[in-house]
Image (cartoon, rainbow, N blue to C red):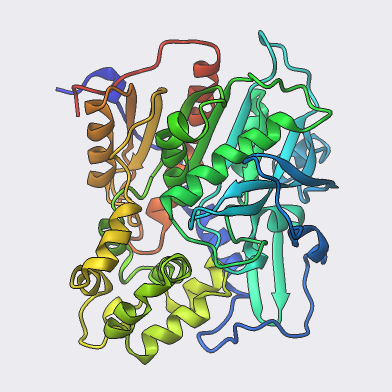
């Protein structure tokens, strides 16, 4: 029998939320590229200002992870949630670049966005910090959240691309609770190199180093020991989970008090099988490109499995944001990309070295030492519900206090990402309150023993 702490949440207003989401998806997909769109940049127009100089790292990087490399003032427009209140953004924004540790283990520069609330902090001690880890953006540099958040919807014509700054929704929700917020762009988005999509180590370190950087920024009301939380959904849920797992060994200096991991891809093969044939099929290209950047020795293994169309899929997705990848490869089966017509998941299983790397992306071998919330939709069409439950069980077995929250959303449009995204939209305020309760020292709900 389930305890009240493992409660199931029925999501109100499903028709309204689904309609808004579908409209947003359509708006993002209309200007996207066709399957034949070139990857190399060409002359064309863009709604995003040219910030090339800012996103170019210095020749020498600082020795210490989390060191701030540079900052500049930033405007976030439009401030949709605040239009009713006159359109004033409730925080001052900065674009930041900081030093982190990449997927290959070496020093890298990562960019992001810092939001300083305009309302004074009324709680005890210094203001708390929330690290927001964004969901899937894509693999092109134009997809970096700090770029798309600046303009709301970043559109360029050559190659055709559209990047929606939806990470601002999570950021402003956390600001509304009183947090200062830092949003990481992750490794390779905006900065040189392929983005190593869903790479556990890269994402976890980028999140923890973003916290370190924010805590060192001048002119904030944070302190070095400010209570810190990490919150993300989808790819961001995996990043938040990774940050929680890696915190004790990689960044024990960060005063982490809680994480919220929404729909975390904790079992990579299981997630690959779930997205196969759906709108996010092409995200497999992001993952393979990232693997090959870190493990070029696996090129021969992938060449044994991929046909010409599969290799072209890697080339095309390498420069895309998620909207145009959905247009180019959405609803296609990965059997179209392999030499023998097997799925990409089955092809990977036949290559032990590929499987070794993929399994290293999985979550659950380590566990957070702080309370954690895991949110998952019953009918999530990107991350299987059972894999999130398994992650909770593995963390519980290692002593973590975990709340499992299952959103009882009916299957509205399997494969179109709507069933994945609705809990993200509907549960944002609940997640923010959960994390603020950890800051205030409220005992954390615990589902361990009932899952």
Who's the residue at 28% across and 31% down the image?
A: 395
Q: Residue 289: x and y, percent?
A: 46, 71
With 374 as the anchor, is 35 left or right in this view?
A: right
With 171 as the anchor, is 387 left or right in this view?
A: left
Screen quadrant of the C terminus = top left
Residue 136 visible here? yes
Q: Judge by depth and name the residue closer to the eye, 422 or 190.
A: 190
Who's the residue at 72% across and 39% down the image?
A: 114
Q: Is residue 88 above or below residue 227?
A: below
Q: Is residue 150 above or below residue 117?
A: below
Outermost residue, left direction? 1
Q: Is residue 338 above or below residue 348?
A: below
Residue 333 visible here? no
Q: Residue 383: x and y, percent?
A: 33, 52
Quadrant of residue 375 in the image?
Answer: top left
Who's the residue at 64% across and 74% down the image?
A: 161
Quadrant of residue 180 in the image?
Answer: top right
Screen quadrant of the N terminus = top left
Q: Residue 243: x and y, percent?
A: 47, 38
Q: Judge by depth and name the residue closer to the eye, 213 or 178.
A: 213
Q: Residue 418: x and y, percent?
A: 42, 56
Q: Is residue 312 above or below residue 116?
A: below
Q: How many marks?
A: 0
């Amino acid at each position: 029998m389930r305890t009240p702490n493992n409660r199931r949440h029925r999501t109100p207003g499903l028709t309204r939320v689904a309609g808004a989401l579908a409209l947003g998806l359509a708006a993002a997909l209309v200007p996207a590229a066709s399957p034949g769109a070139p990857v190399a940049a060409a002359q064309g127009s863009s709604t995003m200002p040219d910030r090339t100089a800012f996103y170019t790292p210095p020749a020498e990087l600082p020795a210490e992870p989390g060191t701030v490399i540079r900052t500049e003032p930033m405007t976030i427009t439009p401030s949709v949630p605040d239009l009713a209140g006159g359109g004033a953004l409730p925080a001052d924004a900065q674009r930041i670049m900081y030093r982190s540790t990449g997927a290959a283990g070496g020093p890298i520069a990562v960019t992001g966005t810092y939001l300083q609330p305009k309302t004074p902090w009324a709680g005890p001690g210094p203001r708390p910090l929330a690290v927001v880890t964004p969901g899937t953006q894509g693999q092109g540099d134009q997809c970096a959240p700090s770029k798309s958040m600046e303009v709301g919807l970043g559109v360029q014509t050559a190659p055709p691309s559209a990047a929606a700054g939806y990470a601002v929704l999570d950021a402003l929700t956390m600001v509304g609770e009183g947090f200062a917020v830092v949003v990481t762009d992750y490794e390779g988005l905006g900065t040189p190199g392929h983005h190593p999509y869903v790479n556990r180590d890269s994402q976890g370190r980028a999140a923890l180093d973003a916290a370190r950087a924010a805590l060192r920024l001048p002119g904030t009301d944070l302190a070095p020991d400010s209570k810190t939380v990490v919150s993300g959904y989808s790819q961001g849920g995996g990043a938040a989970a990774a940050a929680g797992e890696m915190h004790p060994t990689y960044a024990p200096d960060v005063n982490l008090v809680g994480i919220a991991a929404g729909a975390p891809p904790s079992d990579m093969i299981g997630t690959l099988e779930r997205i196969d044939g759906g709108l996010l099929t092409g995200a497999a290209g992001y993952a393979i490109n990232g693997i090959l950047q870190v493990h070029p020795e696996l090129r021969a293994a992938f060449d044994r499995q991929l046909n010409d169309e599969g290799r072209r899929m890697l080339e095309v997705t390498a420069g895309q944001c998620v909207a145009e990848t959905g247009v180019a490869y959405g609803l296609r089966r990965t059997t179209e990309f392999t030499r023998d017509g097997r799925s990409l998941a089955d092809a990977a299983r036949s290559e032990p070295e590929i499987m070794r790397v993929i399994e290293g992306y999985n979550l659950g071998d380590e566990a957070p030492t702080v309370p954690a919330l895991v949110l998952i939709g019953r009918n999530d069409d990107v991350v299987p519900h059972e894999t999130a439950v398994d992650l909770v069980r593995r963390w519980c077995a290692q002593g973590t206090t975990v709340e499992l929250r299952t959103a009882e959303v009916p299957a509205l449009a399997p494969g179109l990402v709507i069933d994945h995204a609705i809990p993200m939209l509907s549960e944002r305020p609940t997640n923010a309150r959960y994390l603020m309760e950890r800051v205030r020292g409220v005992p954390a709900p615990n589902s361990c023993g009932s899952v």
